[in-house]
Image: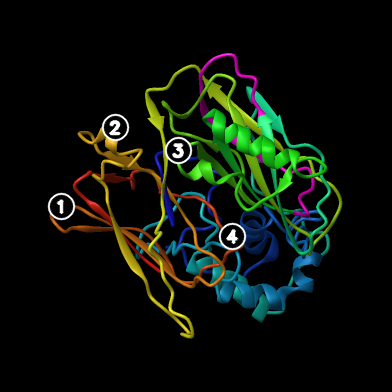
Amino acid sequence: MAILVALLPGCLGEPAGPASVKAPSQPKFDKHVAPIIGQQCLGCHTRGGIGPVPLETYADVAAVADAVQFQVENRLMPPFNADNSGSCRTYRDARWLSDQEIETLSRWVDQGSVGTDSAPPMPGPVLSLENPDLTLATPDFTPTDAPDHYRCFYLESGLEAEQFMTGIQVTPGNAAINHHLLLFTLDDQDTIDSVLEADARQDGPGYDCLVPTASVFTGGGRLVNVWAPGVSAVRFPEGTGIRLHKDQKFAVQIHYNLLGGDGSDSTEIGLLLADGVEREAFVEMYDDFDLDLPAGRAEVTHTTEWFLGNPFNQVFAPIADEGIEVLGVFPHMHEHGIRQRLDYVDEDGNSTCIHDIQRWDFGWQEYFFFQPGESVLMDPAGTLEWSC
């Protein structure tokens, strides 16, 4: 499954070092190592964060230096599913170390992980969405199903008129257990009623779920945001936003993981709003309902394609004469997935890579937003080709 999005978040920070710069021959912790760890790791690896090992000080990093070296050399950490090397494309705010950064960390470890306890604290990712126009909060809930508990919550916006969401920030109440969050709009009364009925059938706030209700995928709602540890504030490009209806209702799905902590959680979702935008942003989902995996095989490759001019396409059909500018993608598979690739092929047969995933990790699903200037212009006469 692939979700194409016509929106783009603000930058979370600059990478620690450009790929064209050579790694220092004798890396220093303060000057060379700390900026990399701070920028690429502290979104998760803090005391009380979802990462099981804190990396906030020199002593923290030195204690697990060999493990850090193994993880980065094998590109297991930082976690980022899509290939960001440029062979397909590069993505904004990618948790992706350049070859120079990996070599810097590896040399530092090989040379004895030298540093001092007096080293200054490492700069972490910047978190900022000042003065949100609307703040939603999930009710206080204590997950109990270990190791993974999926819970959905119904939320009301109270919006007095139609608005456009131009930015969003998710702040977990208990970062040690909050693995990811999906935010859906509920856009018709049947979908709202089905969520309320599911909520009423279970005790306590919310209800156990993998999706809020099936109808959010058949026109009754929209997936409008994904959050995972390390994701900060998202600001859409100037003049764009996602439409929210008057008195918009929402459903939130939160994946709680209890391997690194326990306790209750109440998560806040802050929204930036505008009365109108120059261009409306959409999220479009593509599913492959014909996927059939033969039993007993160690590995199976499956391919499919979607014709963008299909009149049943909810996003493309209304703007068939205009095409669409795609600024990001959210790939999805389940736990048996290994690789996934998505290409756009125009009517002349020219192919453009959207994403290429060589080592899928179900635990790290997220939007991949293209770098500025690398959006993909898709015409309804083209097709999307997907393989997994």
Q: Which residue is mark 4?
A: 364
Residue 95, visible in the rendered structure: yes
Rendered location of residue 95, percent (x, y)? 55, 58
Q: Give the answer, above or below, for where 115 lies relative to 280.
A: below
Label 3 element class: loop
Distance from label 4 to label 2 (Cα)? 33 Å
Question: Tags 3 and 1 in contact by the CB under 8 Å rule?
Answer: no
What is the CA distance from the residue labelled 2 to the residue labelled 3? Answer: 14 Å
Task: Tell me which numbered mark, 3 or 4, is placed earlier along the sequence.
Answer: 3
Alpha-carbon span between mark 3 and mark 1: 28 Å
Distance from disc 1 to disc 4, alpha carbons, whole Å, reads 34 Å
Point 40% across, 69% down: residue: 388
Above or below 193: residue 210:
below
Residue contact at pointers 1 and 4, CB within 8 angstroms: no
Which one is earlier in the sequence, the residue at label 1 or at label 4?
1
First of labels 3, 1 by sequence position:
3
What residue would you read off at disc 2?
A: 318
- Answer with left or right where residue 78 lies relative to residue 123: left
Label 4–label 2 contact, CB within 8 A: no
Indicate which disc, 2 or 1, sits on the residue closer to the N terminus: 2
Q: Check disc 1 and give the amino acid type.
A: Glu
Q: Secondary structure at mark 2?
A: helix
* Earlier residue among tags 2 and 3: 3
| Kind of residue at disc 4 | Trp
Q: Amino acid at mark 2?
A: Pro
